[in-house]
Image (cartoon, grey):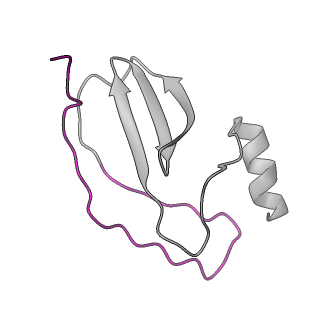
Amino acid sequence: MNSQVERTRKNWGWPPAKGVHAGEYNRIEVVADGARFHSYVNDKPLGYIDDNAIVLGRTGLSVQSFAVTGAIVDFDNFELGKKPGPV
């Protein structure tokens, strides 16, 4: 892993993203449960953050590669919807 990426990850408290398959398609999921946002990659939990400042707004996708050059990122099949509730 690039040392700048590792330093930034540690400074911001990001855990290593285990389960990411470099050079392959990965499934990323974010589930909002009230003010708690859970993140997953390839159906494996990465962690969560609590943020009650976001009440409503827009959604989008963004990528930061830090010092890594030549990164190619594709987004496909973006979906936005409500999580199914109990039956």
Which part of the image, by quadrant, shows the C terminus?
Answer: top left
Which part of the image, by quadrant, shows the N terminus?
Answer: bottom right
Residue 24 location in percent, x, y? Answer: 53, 72
18 left or right of 44?
A: right
The residue at the point 40 percent across, 45 percent down is 29
The residue at the point 48 percent across, 38 percent down is 39
The residue at the point 74 percent across, 49 percent down is 8
Magenta segment: does it hold 62?
A: yes
The residue at the point 77 percent across, 39 percent down is 11
Image quadrant in which you'd find residue 82:
top left
Say if 3 sits above or below 28 in the image.
below
In the image, the segment drawn in magenta is 60-87
47 left or right of 5?
A: left
Residue 22 location in percent, x, y? Answer: 62, 69
Residue 84 location in percent, x, y? Answer: 20, 28
Residue extending furthest toward the front: 87
Q: Main secondary structure of the magenta part?
A: loop
